[in-house]
Image (cartoon, grey):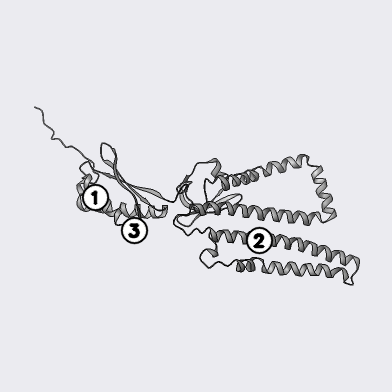
Amino acid sequence: MATKTDKSPFSFFDIIIRRLGVRLLIFVALLLLNFWVPIMPLSQKFHYIIGKTIDILLTASVAGILVALVKVGQDYMFHHYDLNKKDNLRERKIRTQLGFLRKLLVTIIIVVAVCVILLSFDNLRKIGTGLLTGVGIGGIIIGFAAQKSLGNLLAGFQIAFTQPLRIDDALLVEGEWGRVEEITLTYVVVNIWDQRRLILPINYFIEKPFQNWTRSSADLLGSVMLYLDYNVPFDEIRAEFKRLVESHPLWDKRVCVVHVTDATKDVVEIRLLMSASNSGNAFDLRAFVREKMIEFVQKNYPDSLPKTRMELKERRQVG
C-alpha cells in the first residue's frame, strides 16, 4: 500500500497543489457565482433553481476539499512512516491505523455531505421526518440487514487499534501464504505469493484463527526436515549445513541448529533450523538449504537415503 511519495522526493507544497489545487479553484468559482446570482436579471423561479444548484455544488465542493485534506495528511504521514526499511514494524502499525482512519473519515464526510444536500430540500426533509417517526417493521428489517455491516465496522475498529494484523504482515490463512495488501472498513485483501488476491471479510480475523508470521517482528525461523537412514553421519550433516548457511547472504546470523527430532522404525527425522530477517528471505533460504543438503547426501552418503528393508530366508524342505 505504498504511495508514490515513498520513492520520490517529498514536497508538502506539491502535495497540497496536487490534492487541493483544482478543488479550491472550483470552490472559489462557485462562491463568486453564488454572490453574483442574486443580482442577475432572472425570474424568481430561475433564481431559486440556480441558487439551489449552486448550494448543492458548494456542499459537494466543501466535502471534496475535506476529503483532499484527509489525503494530504495521509500522504505526509505515509512519507514519514516509510515501509522501505529493514525493520518496519512501527511503520506497519501506524499505516494500518492511518489507512483505517482515512477510510472512516472519508465515509463520514461523504455521508454528512449527502445528508446536508438532502435536508436542504423541504420535500425530502418531510420524507425523512416521516421515516424517522414511522420506523416500525421497516426499522427492524433495516436493523437486521445492517447487522453484518455494523459487525464488520466494529471488527475494523478492533483490528485497527489492537492490530492482530497490519499492512504488509505475512499471513498463513485459509491454507494460503501471502501479505496483507489492503485493510478496508469491511474486508481485507491478502496478496498471495503467486499474485492472486484472497479477499476476506474483516470480521474473519476476529472470529477465526490464522497465522501471523510477522506479528511482533519481521525476523523468522525457517526449518527444513530431512528423513534419512539410521546410518547417516550426523556430524557431517551438521558441518555441511553450517557451511551452507554461513556462506549464504540471506542468513541473519542468529540461528543455525541441527536437531534429531524423531526416530521411527524406518528413518530418523533431522530438523535443520535457520533464521532470516523476513519471511521472504526465510523461504528462499529454506529452499536453497533443502536442495543443497539433498544433493550432499546423494553425492556423499547415498546409503543414508531412506530405504525399505526386507529379509529373505532360504526355505528348507522337510522329508
Q: Amino acid at mark 1?
A: Ala
- Judging by the rendered image, the residue that carries numbered circle 3 is 249
- Judging by the rendered image, the residue that carries numbered circle 1 is 239
* Helix, strand or loop under label 2: helix
Q: Quadrant of residue 42?
A: bottom right
Q: How far apart are the alpha carbons under marks 1 and 3? A: 18 Å
* Helix, strand or loop under label 1: helix
Q: What's the residue at 65%, 44% (across, down)?
A: 150
Q: Are marks 2 and 1 in contact (CB under 8 Å)?
A: no
Mark 2 or mark 1: which comes first in sequence?
2
In the picture, the disc for residue 187 is none
Residue 167 coordinates in the image, percent (x, y): 52, 53
Q: What's the residue at 57%, 58% (across, down)?
A: 77
Residue 1 coordinates in the image, percent (x, y): 54, 58
Q: Residues within 10 Å of mark 2 (few under 14, many from 20)?
A: some
Residue 11 coordinates in the image, percent (x, y): 58, 67
Q: Residues within 10 Å of mark 3 (few under 14, many from 20)?
A: few
* Helix, strand or loop under label 3: loop
For this view, does 278 lie left or right of residue 104? left
On screen, residue 284 above or below 226: below
On screen, residue 47 above or below 307: below
Q: Amino acid at mark 3?
A: Pro
